[in-house]
Amino acid sequence: MVTMAAPAATARTARTDNKVDREDRSTVGHQFVDNARMTCRDVNVYYGEKHAIKNVSIDVGRNEVLAMIGPSGCGKSTFLRCLNRMNDTVDTCRVYGEIRLDELDIYDKSVDVVPLRAQVGMVFQKPNPFPKSIYENVAYGPKIHGLSANRTELDHIVESSLKKAGLWTEVNDRLDQPGTGLSGGQQQRLCIARAIAVRPEVILMDEPCSALDPIATATVEDLIAELQEQYTIVIVTHNMQQAARVSQRTAYFHLGDLIEVGKTDRVFTNPRHKLTEDYITGRFG
């Protein structure tokens, strides 16, 4: 069961001084932006008794790519799943705090998670096409959400989504073939096309390139840069070079704490927290 009734907790104040000591867990840098698409305030997540996310506050800017980095088990994927309520599927998970998409409190009891997850789409670590044709993989979402009135409109949505995902020229002559028959990189782009087809406002990506070869990874990274013009994107990645290539802002997590947030080039060239510096320079993680 998931609830957003906030427990007693004191919000941490962002710090801006250089080289904050590693024992200081308060967030360094600029957590908030003027043109926010999503706002998160004092978010805490528990799995049973385990405190997985600790009082995290951050904004996601409109039409920006926000990268979330940190060692395994630091909470970045858990936090990502809070942004479209994927953690609702975990019985032991409890979420406290406030998360808004524009003015919508996404954890309000009146919010239907099905349209929410269309608005805030998810691309997972491992490509997971449906056991259907390429066409039906993309058409499935628009059908169930009533986004097309007839087959002509549906055809247009499928073609447009595959083009935006950079896949149309590779598959347009075999749309009736199984999506599972595509290469790994093509399957991941098919999953991106599937997410785009339901007209999302935000796209969440959880390690979208971890199972791909370098060429397919480069293709997906180029796609992210193109999609940013129309969508807000949050990406979790262990690949710091990838974060540096695709994102405008980077958030570093460590043991459930949001340690540092800032413009990507600044975070990677002049980290202000010792924990961030140690991770980026390879001293741990």
Image (cartoon, rainbow, N blue to C red):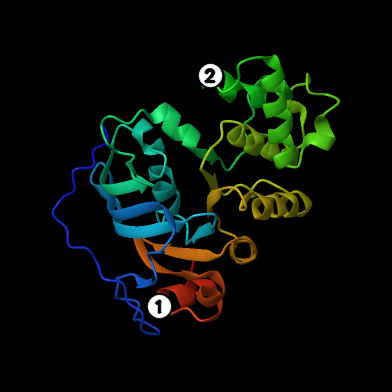
| Amino acid at dot 1 | His
Looking at this view, is 54 or 33 the one in front? 33
Residue in the picture at 18% in, 43% down: 5
Considering depth in this image, is 169 or 54 the residue closer to the camera?
169
* Identity of the residue furthest to the right in this view: 173
| Secondary structure state at the residue bearing disc 2 | helix
In percent of width and height, residue 195 lies at 58, 35
What is the x, y in percent for residue 248? 56, 65
Q: Residue furthest bottom?
A: 18
Q: Nearer the viewer, residue 224 or 131?
A: 224
Q: Is residue 281 in view?
A: no
**What residue sits right under mark 2 in the picture?**
144
Q: Residue 39 appears at what percent x and percent y?
A: 36, 53
- The vertical placement of 110 against 144, above or below, is below
Identify the mark at residue 150; answer none if there is no mark: none
Q: Earlier in the sequence, mark 1 or mark 2?
A: 2
Q: Name the side, left or right, on which 186 lies relative to 69.
A: right
- Identify the element where label 1 is drawn: loop
Q: Which residue is mark 1?
A: 273
Vertical side of 185 occupied by 261: above or below: below
Q: Residues within 10 Å of mark 2 (few under 14, many from 20)?
A: few
Distance of mark 1 from mark 2, alpha carbons? 46 Å
Q: Report the label total.
A: 2
What residue is rendered at 29% in x and 55% in y?
A: 41
